[in-house]
Image: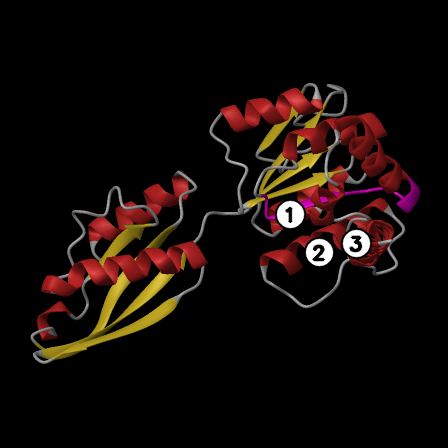
Amino acid sequence: MQKNSLNALIEAIDNREAVALVTVTSGEGAFAQAVGRNAVVRSQLDGCQEVELGLGNWNEPVLRDARLAVASKKHRHFSYEEVGGRFTVFVEVQPRPPHLIIAGAGHIAVPLASIAKTCEFLVTVIDDRPQYAHKARFPTADGVVAGPFRQTLVDLRQGKETFDNDTYVVLVTRGHQHDIDCLLELLDDPLAYLGMIGSRRRIRAVFELLEKEQSIPASKFDRVRAPIGIDIGAITPAEIAVCIMAEIICILREGPLPGLSEQIQRERIERRNRAQARVGEGGNG
């Protein structure tokens, strides 16, 4: 690997930035001299203009395909051919590390933060109780913040964190109102995962309260994974943390296992469809 490419990869890791290492793996004819060349490509256009792989007019199309691979978070092989020769490249994607935000620093959060860090997640824990939200309680977490839940989320967003499809949020707070505060702040964010712990009764109460008092469309809650996790018969806090992390990894890796939330999601959708059907029948009458 060329020294410049190595330095760029290290910088991307330090900055939690998604990039790809593009390597010309074979070349014939006019492209034979480019074999072995590599370069680091970012997902955005800025910073890519000076990347040169020795491919002439094919340089920009290759970079464009590489940026698409970065966006898809998947390694890709590409082949190109023209009258003067042909070549292949391998695009090795280095995605941004996923970020897990745990809202609530109680008994489930402790093993969850540890398991997530073992799985190479960036981990942030927030809670409004300083006696719970402190580094000694979460030694492996990258960040521990004591402060009001909603304001802390606002502060994280206004800082260097982005709430996007690399962000996973788990709500394991100690009460309805904290869940509501977090949901009000997060429902419109394009998160990879938003899960909330609680019984069906508690979850339904939270959703119905937000629908009634905040006029939030019921369909917005379909993306909330609640009850949280995959059903493995978990009982202890550590076991519950495992079932939560299992669902998160399933989402991250596009796995096939259904989560506990899917049945209640189907029930909510079915209730809405029945209600809409009744309204339609009344209108037709």
Q: Nearer the viewer, residue 149 or 13?
A: 149
**Magenta region includes residue 177:** no
Counting residues from the N terminus, which is met first, the one under dot 2 or under dot 3?
2
Amino acid on which the number 2 mark rests in the picture: Glu
Find numbered disc 2 in the image and state the secondary structure of the residue it sits on.
helix
Q: Is residue 282 left or right of residue 118?
A: right
Residue 127, given in percent of the width and then of the height, sits at 72, 25
Side (left or right) of 179 relative to 10 = right
Q: Which residues are magenta?
A: 191-201
What amino acid is found at the position of numbered circle 3 in the picture? Ile
Q: Secondary structure at mark 3?
A: helix
Residue marked by disc 1: 193
Residue 247: numbered disc: 2
Q: Residue 269 shows which numbered tag?
A: 3
The image shows residue 39 at horizontal and vertical percentages of: 23, 56
Residue 220 drawn above or below residue 271: above
Label 3: few (<14), some (14–19) or many (≥20) C-alpha neighbours in 10 Å: some
Q: Is residue 124 left or right of residue 258?
A: left
Splitting the image into 4 quarters, where does residue 256 fall?
bottom right
- The answer for how far apart the CA atoms under marks 2 and 3 are is 21 Å
Q: CA distance from mark 1 to mark 3?
A: 19 Å
